Amino acid sequence: MAHHDEYTARKLRTIDTLRAALNDVTDDARRFEAKYRLFQEFRTFSMDTTLTLARELVTTATRNDSLIWLSHIMEVEALKGLGEYSAALQLLDRIPQPWKQTFRERILNRYVSIYYSLSEYPPTPEAGERYFNKLDAYRDSVSMFVGRTHVSYWLNNAERQRAHGRFRQALASLDSANRMMPGTVDPGVMAYLRASNHEALGDLTTAKKEYAVAAAYDLRHAVRKYESLQELARILSAEGDNTRAYTYIMCAINDIKASKARSRTARIADYLPIVLATYTQQQENMVHNKNLLLITVTALALALVVSLLFIRRKNLRLDAERRRLHDKN
């Protein structure tokens, strides 16, 4: 976290380099590739820019139907990040059937992502159950489509197991994903998924370590719409470490605001008690320090009064002794 601004600056330098390269491009094919690379840089950094780039990609690919619908799928990702779930679902439903077959895995994963977010904070219990069932069905569809030899199969299986409370099986599926294609899964995502399962099993020590690993990866790569640092803050707050919890949650909130990831803002409300607890603790510390200062000042004042009375009494004795000596002389 001490190097947060440095990592952000490095990300911005990469973006500036890609933008400069885009300005030098003359033909449409290379322009699409350059904008696609920019989209990949922005997709975890700034959601509104991601949406702008996705829509620019649609116009750039006007003479290529495959790239047009690929761009629309990227637009769906941006809309979901901005919390525009209805618009994202409508756009997915508009994709012609032939292209739904061509981009089946991408489209299924977009449905999974949208319904996962919808199921987290549903407006009613009935809606929550409906979203969860759709999420479960789409995860099953992804697994059936890609097969057991694909890493997506094991990741989706891990999430399905976790959703149904089978946390050890979920961890086993994550291990299988690492064995199938080591190094292909985002380390931050993998650490976060492992942490959530370890926490559910009651192993908070391992959970905190995994959340910290995930948070460190996200911070180093300027991933702004992360959850790991928030979860770590929640555990630390429950353990009474409100100072670190407050530092972590404020960093996460500031990054979410900077990324315009409105799909994450609903979760912020869950962490406001951490901010409130820390604020309350700070207020209590201020009152305690104020009371301590008042007691100290009062004690010093009393000591001063006692000292003055003692000195006055001594001076009176000295005056009496001086008069006695004067009379004797």
Image (spheres, helix red, strand yellow):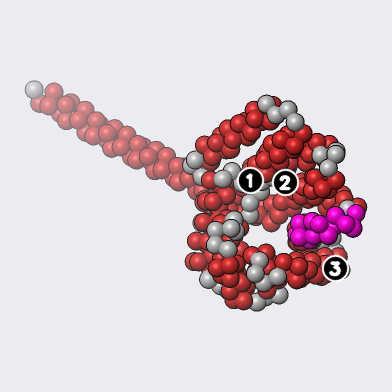
Tell me what residue is drawn at x 32 percent, y 34 percent.
Answer: 308
Relative side of 61 to 31, left or right? right
Tell me what residue is drawn at x 80 percent, y 36 percent.
Answer: 60
Question: What element does badge 1 sit on?
Answer: loop
Label 3 – label 1 distance at C-alpha: 30 Å
Q: Which residues are magenta?
A: 96-109
Q: Quadrant of residue 63?
A: top right
Relative side of 8 to 257, left or right? left
Q: Earlier in the sequence, mark 3 or mark 1?
A: 3
Vertical position of residue 269 compared to residue 202: above or below = above
Residue 138 is a magenta residue: no
Tell me what residue is drawn at x 85 percent, y 54 percent.
Answer: 99
Q: Which residue is mark 1?
A: 224
Is residue 277 at all visible to an observer of this figure? no
Q: Nearer the viewer, residue 21 or 297?
A: 21
Q: Which residue is mark 2?
A: 261
Label 3 – label 2 distance at C-alpha: 24 Å
Q: Amino acid at mark 2?
A: Ala
Q: Quadrant of residue 97?
A: bottom right
Q: Earlier in the sequence, mark 1 or mark 2?
A: 1
Label 1 – label 2 distance at C-alpha: 8 Å
Q: Nearer the viewer, residue 41 or 317?
A: 41
Residue 103 is a magenta residue: yes
Tell me what residue is drawn at x 67 percent, y 72 percent.
Answer: 148
The disc placed on residue 130 is: 3
Residue 284: x, y in percent? 55, 50
Magenta: predominant secondary structure element? helix
Question: What element does badge 2 sit on?
Answer: loop
Q: Residues within 10 Å of mark 2 (few under 14, many from 20)?
A: many
Residue 8: x, y in percent? 57, 38
